[in-house]
Image (cartoon, rainbow, N blue to C red):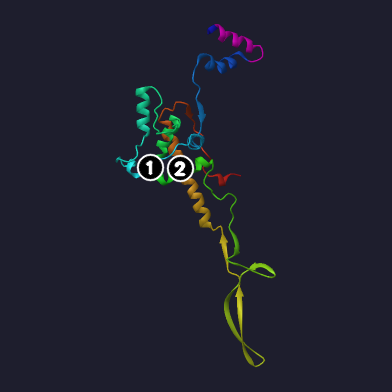
Amino acid sequence: MADRHNMLIEGAAKTFDRGAVEARIAPVVRGQKVKRALGVQQILEWAFGRECVRIDTDPTSRLGGQGAVGFGMEYVLLQRQILGCRVDTSVGRSSPHEDAEIVAAIVENLPQTYGGLPMALRIAEYARAGTTPDWLPGARTRVVPKEWSENQFGVRASTAVAEVISYRHRGRMVKREVRCCPVTYTPSASQIAAARRGYLDWWGALHHIRHGLGLVRLSDIDVTDAMPPMEPWRRR
């Protein structure tokens, strides 16, 4: 094995730097397992999108009753340490990767301060779709008519009676309607603020999940500090 290792290095060193080649092929020659370095968003998309792991929403199993059996993060880690192998927690199907099961357990146990189970389900859905919450990029408040009407001349803004005035004309009283076009603001400032508040809530939950992933040992993944932008609407 040592002779093969030196031959590979000597042959490649004719063209490439010896140190760089040795560092690159060493894990392959020595049989070392190379982990993937992924950020929390990439890990979630891999776990829920590719591995199709799911969050347990059964209230009985979540409360420790006699319903469906739930396998939490602690159970998976303990059994892995005892058996030295992957634990199959599925019935009648191929189970997701053990790292994906751990990711799902961390997301499932998201504290209420970060949104609890509803936020966990949102995170899972965004991860499966490979998207992020809609923070209304490029949104600007505009003044538009409240209603539109259509006739033979086309589509026009609807009008409403603002008031009725009376005045004397050629010796008689005349009444006339004063009409206006009711308008609204869309999207409103409150709608934009709500969308961006929702994005920030999602980002805060991901930050907590990243911290949780850093406290466990994943077999195939190294968790990096990479995070999606906190306030993408501030980018220039």
Label 1 and label 2: CA atoms lie apart by 12 Å
Residue ranking furthest to the front? 92
Between residues 219 and 83, which one lies in front from this camera angle?
A: 83
Relative to 141, 211 lies left or right: left
Q: Main secondary structure of the magenta part?
A: helix
Whether residue 5 appears in magenta in the rendering, the answer is yes
Disc 2 residue crowd, few under 14, some 14–19, many 20+, Cα 10 Å: some
Q: Which residues are magenta?
A: 3-16
Could you say where residue 161 lies in the image, as x and y percent from the top left? Answer: 58, 76
Residue tagged 1: 111
Query: Closer to the N terminus: mark 1 or mark 2?
Result: 1
Choose top left, top right, bottom left or bottom right for residue 110: top left
Q: Residue furthest left?
A: 65
Q: Is residue 167 above or below residue 200?
A: below
In the visual, does 61 lie left or right of 18? left
At 56% from the left and 8% from the top, the residue drawn is 4
Residue at figure coordinates x 52%, y 56% from the top left: 191
Residue with the mark numbered 2:
204
User: Three-letter amino acid code at disc 2?
Assistant: Gly
Q: Position of residue 154 (x, y in %)?
A: 68, 67
- List the single residue furthest toward the right: 153
Which image quarter: residue 10? top right
